[in-house]
Image: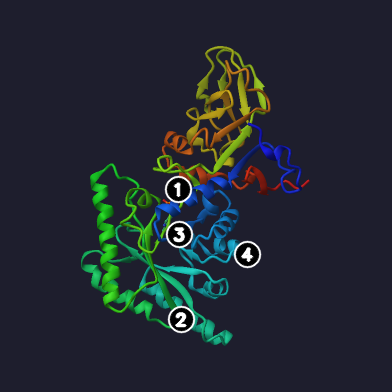
């Protein structure tokens, strides 16, 4: 397949270094959004774009979400939120992770919503808003927050199981009534919603869900209602669709067309990580390939060198085990993966020549499979794609943007 951007000589796309690169298919993201939106019923849609949209480029994905009328974005931290705001995206943005209270003025000025995971943070944020009011004379300044409940993930959030329910309700009600705090939402996160094959895990998710529901009801009885209740990560969207919708769904990996259930839902992988064959050589019988001598040739062989290594995000743990994809079929990686390159076995593959394109992962070679080989999850392989790998953004088969460091 020929890629349009080869012919496209716009200043944006032309100076790309065709060494190793990632094509981001925004049409696939749009398709995935529409399928997931349908699955959300009437619920609002929060697109998780943390970690540079799982490596796909948060600015482009956020702009697309705005164009498609998504309702909310979520990021991990303030820097990620500001990057999106600076690109003129006005959708509400929720910071899922930690923001120290001294940054509250920035949260307010950039109109960013903050998760609050315990009483002490709620108090500190309220204090900071009051200080901001005094300093700026803006008496109406408020910090929008979403209360984070820990229903069983045991990471962050108000602990609320068992004998902690009462105190959690009291603490949350207190935080919601603090000056300068607008408690718009409440949410929780599932720890095993993506593992429906184990009945124990299904029961666990159901218990988390029941506790979330109970907490929202108890809080309502205590006079605390929230405009947006949400808990459905990708696993819940696939496996607990209706029960976990509430007011908004919150998928990440599915939006990028990966993860368990993506194929069944007809979602399309959005990232295609590409490289080319840079060198072909014919080492003799007994030659050991790369560091550590993990692979020894049984006979004189045709060996290709790919200019991609662990510094590009190709995990070293995949050494001697990965299979990539070429137009002529699967290509086996041999020997240790180095920082900037790795070797492949091209014996009996005469059609794969110098300059041939190789898909590391993407529509032809799903990242989920490669992740299994590495003993990890697709999230990690997507996030691992280093910033030195240029991103090319495609829409309607055309390049509409790029992120790279090549300035000729
Ligand atoms: C990352 C994250 C998500 C998205 O998870 P996926 O499994 O990618 O759908 C949702 N909610 C929270 C709190 C997260 O941290």
Q: Which colouring convention does the figure follow?
A: rainbow
Tell me the CA gap for discs 4 and 1: 25 Å
The residue identified by callout 2 is 180
Q: State which mark lies toward you, 3 or 4.
A: 3
Q: State which mark lies toward you, 3 or 1.
A: 3
Tell me the CA gap for discs 3 and 4: 20 Å
> Of label 3 and label 1, which has the lower sequence position?
3
Point out residue 54 in the picture as x, y percentages from the top left corner: 51, 50
- The image's mark for residue 88 is 4
The residue identified by callout 1 is 254
Label 1 C-beta lies within 8 Å of the nearest ligand 1 atom: yes
Q: State which mark lies toward you, 2 or 4.
A: 4
Q: Which image quarter holds the N terminus? A: top right
Residue drawn at x 44%, y 51% is: 36
> Of label 2 and label 4, which has the lower sequence position?
4
Asked if residue 274 can be seen in this view, the reply is yes
Q: State which mark lies toward you, 3 or 2.
A: 3
Query: Of helix, strand and loop, which one carries label 3?
Result: strand
Q: Nearer the viewer, residue 360 or 263?
A: 263
Query: Of helix, strand and loop, which one carries label 4?
Result: loop
> Of label 4 and label 1, which has the lower sequence position?
4
Residue drawn at x 49%, y 27% is: 320
- The image's mark for residue 45 is 3
Q: Nearer the viewer, residue 193 or 278?
A: 193
Residue 215 against residue 12 in the figure, above or below: below
Tell me the CA gap for discs 3 and 2: 26 Å
């Amino acid at each position: 397949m020929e890629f349009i951007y080869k012919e496209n000589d716009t200043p944006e796309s032309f100076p790309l270094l065709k060494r190793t690169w990632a094509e981001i298919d925004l049409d696939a993201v749009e398709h995935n959004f529409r399928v997931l939106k349908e699955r959300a019923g009437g619920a609002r849609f929060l697109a998780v774009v943390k970690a540079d949209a799982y490596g796909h480029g948060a600015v482009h994905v956020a702009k697309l979400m705005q164009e498609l009328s998504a309702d909310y974005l979520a990021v991990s931290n303030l820097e990620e939120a500001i990057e999106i705001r600076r690109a003129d995206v006005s959708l509400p943005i929720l910071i899922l992770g930690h923001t120290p209270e001294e940054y509250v003025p920035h949260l307010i000025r950039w109109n960013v919503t903050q998760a609050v995971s315990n009483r002490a943070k709620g108090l500190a944020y309220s204090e900071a808003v009051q200080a901001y009011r005094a300093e700026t004379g803006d008496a109406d300044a408020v910090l929008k927050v979403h209360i984070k409940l820990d229903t069983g993930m045991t990471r962050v959030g108000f602990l609320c199981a068992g004998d902690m329910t009462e105190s959690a309700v009291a603490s949350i009600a207190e935080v919601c009534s603090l000056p300068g705090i607008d408690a718009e939402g409440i949410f929780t996160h599932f720890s095993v919603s993506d593992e429906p094959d184990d009945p124990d895990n299904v029961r666990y998710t159901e218990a988390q869900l029941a506790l979330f529901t109970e907490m929202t009801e108890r809080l309502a009885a205590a006079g605390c209602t929230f405009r947006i209740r949400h808990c459905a990560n990708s696993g819940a969207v696939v496996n607990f669709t209706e029960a976990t919708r509430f007011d908004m769904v919150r998928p990440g990996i599915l939006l990028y067309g990966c993860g368990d259930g993506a194929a069944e839902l007809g979602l399309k992988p959005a990232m295609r990580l590409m490289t080319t064959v840079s060198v072909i050589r014919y080492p003799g019988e007994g030659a050991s390939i790369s560091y550590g001598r993990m692979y020894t040739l049984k006979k004189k062989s045709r060996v290709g060198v790919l200019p991609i290594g662990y510094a590009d995000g190709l995990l070293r743990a995949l050494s001697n085990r990965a299979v990539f994809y070429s137009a002529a079929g699967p290509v086996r990686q041999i020997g240790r993966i180095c920082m900037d390159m790795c070797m492949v076995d091209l014996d009996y593959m005469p059609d794969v020549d110098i300059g041939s394109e190789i898909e590391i992962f993407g529509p032809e070679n799903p990242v989920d499979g490669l992740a299994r080989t590495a003993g990890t999850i697709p999230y990690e392989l997507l996030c691992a794609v280093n910033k030195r790998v240029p991103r090319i953004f495609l829409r309607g088969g055309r390049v509409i943007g790029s992120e790279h460091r090549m300035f000729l």
